[in-house]
Amino acid sequence: MVATDPKKTLDAYRAKRGEFRVVEVPPMQYLMVDGAGDPNTAPAYSDAVSALFSLAYTLKFASRKELGIDTVVMPLEGLWHAPDMASFTTARDKSAWLWTMMIMVGDHITPSMFDDAVAAVAQKAAKKKEPLPALDSVRLESLDEGRCVQTLHVGPFDDEGPVLDELHHRFIPDNGLQMRGRHHEIYLSDLRRADPARLRTILRQPVAPAGLTG
């Protein structure tokens, strides 16, 4: 049995509070589901998270049984964007947010394993009469972010605005970079149990050299 914890081996899952750092993020495979609206009130958000974790744990056990690879279930992550990015910084208009919630799974997870996991989770949910509305919307997809800037935010999500404003309007342009791709968050804390004041969230923004087009 091979035990792995990518959080301890991948630089992409390391960040320090108060420090913006440029990192090269390798291509990784995720369970993903798309949605829109305020994550605090939109039913689609909680449905998406429930489906993702149900699949992630099912794949963990399948990987251990079929491949002899025992990997931890990785933290919830989110890709966020909006027609006006000020809705994340100064305006904080959560109703305008568009999101892709996801959990990283190893490259050893194959499409057939994913399909089997979806079927197993659906069967279990039907037996328990606990529907998972977002299950059929989950997909297995690779994401290649490449060069990014990231930092660690400690505290409530609603306090991220000033950190993101500094990232977007000071650090990135001051270092000859420009934003590309979607704002990325990695939730290192257990959102069900952690004190909001102690929530640990990696904030990541893919970047490119300033002036680069195409």
Image (cartoon, rainbow, N blue to C red):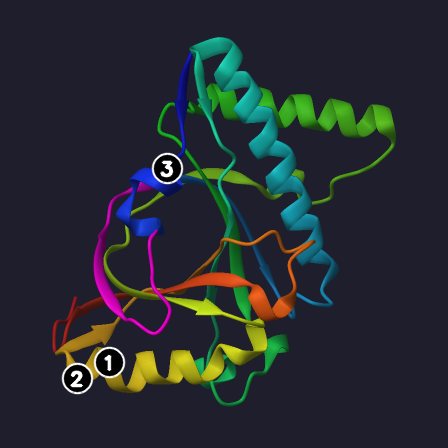
Query: Of helix, strand and loop, which one carries label 2?
Result: helix
Q: Write down the quadrant of residue 136 in the picture.
A: top right
Residue 152 image position (x, y, % from top left): 40, 65
Question: Which residue range is magenta in the image?
Answer: 14-28
Mark 1 Cα-neighbour bin, 10 Å: few <14, some 14–19, many ≥20? some
At 22% from the left and 57% from the top, the residue drawn is: 23
On residue 31, the disc is none
At 15% from the left and 71% from the top, the residue drawn is: 213
Cα distance between the residues tagged 3 and 2: 32 Å
Check disc 3 and report the residue beneath it.
6
Judged by depth in the image, the label closer to the viewer, 3 or 2, is 3
Q: Are marks 2 and 1 in contact (CB under 8 Å)?
A: yes
Query: Which is more N-terminal, label 2 or label 3?
Result: 3
At 64% from the left and 58% from the top, the residue drawn is: 194
Magenta stretch contains residue 15 = yes
Q: Nearer the viewer, residue 72 or 82?
A: 72
Mark 2 Cα-neighbour bin, 10 Å: few <14, some 14–19, many ≥20? few
| Badge 2 amino acid | Asp
Cα distance between the residues tagged 1 and 3: 28 Å
Check disc 2 and report the residue beneath it.
174
Residue 68 image position (x, y, % from top left): 44, 11
Q: Nearer the viewer, residue 35 or 157?
A: 157
Vertical position of residue 66 compared to residue 95: above or below: above
Vertical position of residue 1 compared to residue 168: above or below: above
On residue 171, the disc is 1
| Badge 3 amino acid | Pro
| Badge 1 amino acid | Phe
